[in-house]
Amino acid sequence: MIVVLDRNISSEKLEVITSELKNFGFDVFQSNTRENITLEITGNNSGFDLRKIKVLEGVIDILGITEQYKLVNKKFKTDKTIIKINNVEIGGEEIIVIAGPCSVESEEQIHKLAKIVKTAGAKILRGGAFKPRTSPYSFQGLGEEALKFLRDAADENQLLMITEIIEPSQFDLIEKYTDIFQVGSRNMYNYPLLKVLSKSQKPVLLKRGMSATIDEWLMSAEYILSGGNPNVILCERGIRTFENYLRFTFDISVIPVVQQKTHLPICSDPSHAVGFSDKIPSMARAAVAANTDLIMIEIHDNPNKALSDGPQSLTPDEFLLLINQLRQIASIIGRKLG
Ligand code: PEP
Ligand code: MN
């Protein structure tokens, strides 16, 4: 339930209401938006007489939320979440580009690609250090060495970095290096991992599970917010459907749906969705036209030799051409890109 308060309420009155609600047995989360101050209350309210809340001085209304997710719900917080890291604003007017290789393969490779990423005007460098591969015989990533290379390459080019965390035990190590944690599609339901990330203030990019419904995905985001971390970016990366011609089916329609249901920024990852580099530019253009907040593209200087996801990696030239097109599309819909 949402308790809507008088926007000019004094901090003393707010404290009284909060402690009353806690006395009633509810957990209380506060949100201040431009329009109002709201308290999201969770806990068992069956049989509870809501008039006890309505009569508290400063309470204007009580709203029921039918969806299970509360804190990620746009009904709870109407302002879009803007995540600021250094001078980058995620979820603001600018569409943020994340680019880099699937895996960090060597120091030389990531430095070379970081320069391309910077030249394109992208803001975030990606690269896997710990790879969740379908086959145990595939390349599993360079581990901590890759984190160091990625951090240096990002710093040298004034970029932010993002890398994937696979299990809770990696938290301290990855936190030392990264600006943003990535939770992969295969881990969207890994609740122990989400709980650990909920205790960090570093942003989390939460990929949609490949067979997850929108509600399941938003509930996973709710785990992170309810633990205390408000900085979540949702990422559509393709879902499994009856159609198997491409790697997955890129669910572009989820962009406006998510923007209607939540205040969180949405990223689109056509690379993992379609899986073939020749189909990625058109899907990236479509995602920008559909008003995505971020776009993630995998690139490689020699895709045929890539240790993972070569077939879906754009070459530097293909990437730079694409970014120019995306910039034009962004301006048509009233946004900026890089
Ligand atoms: C990745 O981004 O490299 C990755 C493994 O993505 P996903 O979890 O979407 O498969
Ligand atoms: Mn990949």
Image: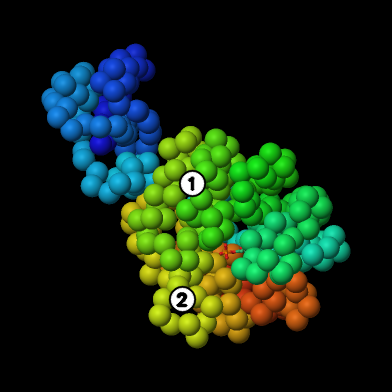
Taking 253 as reference, is 24 above or below it?
Answer: above
Amino acid carrying mark 2 in the image: Thr
Which quadrant of the rendered structure holds the C terminus?
bottom right
First in residue order: circle 2 vs circle 1: 1
Q: Can residue 194 be seen in this view?
A: yes
In the rendered image, residue 170, in percent from the top left (x then y), is placed at: 67, 45
Taking 10 as reference, is 130 above or below it?
Answer: below
Residue corresponding to mark 1: 191
Left or right of 310, for residue 105: right
Left or right of 272, for residue 145: right
Q: Quadrant of residue 225?
A: top left
Q: Residue at x 47, y 60 (%)?
A: 208
Q: Residue at x 38, y 55 (%)?
A: 216
Count of marks, rendered view:
2
Q: Residue 249 has which mark?
A: 2
View extreme (front): residue: 136
Q: Quadrant of residue 36?
A: top left
Distance from disc 2 to disc 1, alpha carbons, whole Å, reads 25 Å
In the rendered image, residue 198, in percent from the top left (x then y), is placed at: 52, 39
Q: In which quarter of the image is residue 302?
A: bottom right
| Crowdedness near tag 1: few (<14), some (14–19) or many (≥20) residues, C-alpha within 10 Å | some
In the rendered image, residue 4, in percent from the top left (x then y), is placed at: 25, 32
What element does badge 1 sit on? helix
Q: Which of marks 2 and 1 is in front?
A: 1
